[in-house]
Image: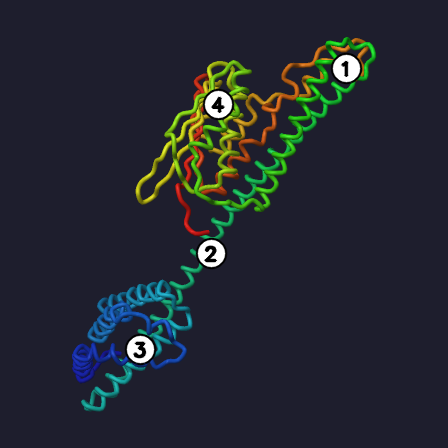
Amino acid sequence: MDESPAATRMLHGLVRHLRERRQAILRSWQRLVDGDPQLTTASSLPKIQFNDHIPEVLGAFERRLLAGDSSWAKLEAIEDQKEGAARHGLLRWQQGYNQRETAREWGHLQLALLEELETFGEAIGGSGDVEAMRLARRALARLIGDGVSESATQYAELRQSDAAVRAAELERALESLSFLEQQRAQAWREAAHDLRGNVGVLETAVAVLDHDAAPQAMRAQSMEVLRRTVQSLHALLVDLMNLSRLEAGQEKARLETIDVARTLRELCDSLRPLAKKRNLFLHAAGPGTLEVEGDSVKVVRIAQNLLLNALRYTKHGGVLAAWEACGSEARPQWQLTISDSGPGITASTTAPMAHKLEEATREGQPVASDAAESISETPSEPGPLAESAGDPTHGEGIGLTIVKRLCELLDASLELESSPEQGTTFRVTFPRGYAQR
């Protein structure tokens, strides 16, 4: 049904009235919202954020009234209303509104606009007032309905998107947890393998000592192997206990001011006889004094595991332990570097650190049970025991796992560089100070 000329004139007058009263309408809307005890989020918003896209929506509403029976102009104005309402709804969710609060806010906007429509109708009157006001109220109902609908749609889409993100994060977390569990199981399997190997060496040595026909030289050798294997077992059990405490979260950092230069130099001095026994050098390099905040016991455990690991792999040349201050004034740090001239790690340099550390742990890891195979369990003529059996620097397979856990505990990063036949370098970067824990 076409609009009458009188209704068209009145609608044009209504649009002029709404444009003139735009700021008054927005103020009235905000007063209604502020007076609603069920709406609290709006009170914390600045005026520009509160109004948001509503002025655009009101502009589209006015163009809708002016369009009359022009289908194209009317549809364009309605689409603009929806688009503005959708943007307004999106921002409201980002501002912390829930679905009910946004719907109530649209209801208050409807009341503010109805009040202006009634004021205009009472002031103008005329033959076209009934038809014009009927059209205006229908357009207003469409505006508010679209506003609530588009806002709800935005809320549903955001909830769905958020749920998809959370599901993806959960899936990644589960994959990470599964991978960590596999790593942990592998570490414990390697430790069990080493335990069995050491026990096998013990059984072999005891069998030799129990054999009446064993030569005196072989019995002496068996006693030495027995002593060294017991040391190795003790070290392995201590490492297993330490690892279990770390994984159970029972280890805590005991922070104090320490001179890591002195601590690391003393550690290198204590390990130098072992390096000399293997015909290797062990050099220490760094400033004479380097005071930092840290846990000296755990720093020593990290350095000792890395040094023993380097000595274990290296056959020729030696190992360098270096320390230095690094970082920036805003983020002061210090770095420990352990480099060896060993065989290097054959894994790709792009492999994840966890894989590299696992491979580094496995490489060069002797199977102590091989030593046990050199003689039978009940030999008629006992054979010689392997020289490396029971060596405390061999085969624990969990040293690097402990290093990783200790680094996590001390907020330290662990980096690895390695090239086949050119050696391996571990770098551990520590904070020089810690925030209050």
On residue 376, which mark appears?
A: 1
Q: Which residue is mark 2?
A: 163
Q: Are marks 1 and 2 in contact (CB under 8 Å)?
A: no
Amino acid tagged 4: Ile
User: Which SS class for mark 4?
Assistant: loop
Sequence-earlier tag: 4 or 3 = 3
Horizontal arrangement in the rendering, residue 93 relative to residue 60 (left or right): right
Residue 43 in which image quadrant: bottom left
User: Which SS class for mark 1?
Assistant: loop
> Residue 121: horizontal and vertical position, in percent?
22, 88
Q: Which residue is mark 4?
A: 345
> Residue 314: horizontal and vertical position, in percent?
51, 18
For label 2, the crowd category at 10 Å Cα-Cα, with few meaning under 14, some 14 to 19 and many 20 or more, is few
Q: Nearer the viewer, mark 3 or mark 1?
A: 1
Amino acid tagged 3: Leu
Sequence-earlier tag: 4 or 2 = 2
For label 4, the crowd category at 10 Å Cα-Cα, with few meaning under 14, some 14 to 19 and many 20 or more, is many
Sequence-earlier tag: 4 or 1 = 4
* Residue at 43% over, 52% down: 436
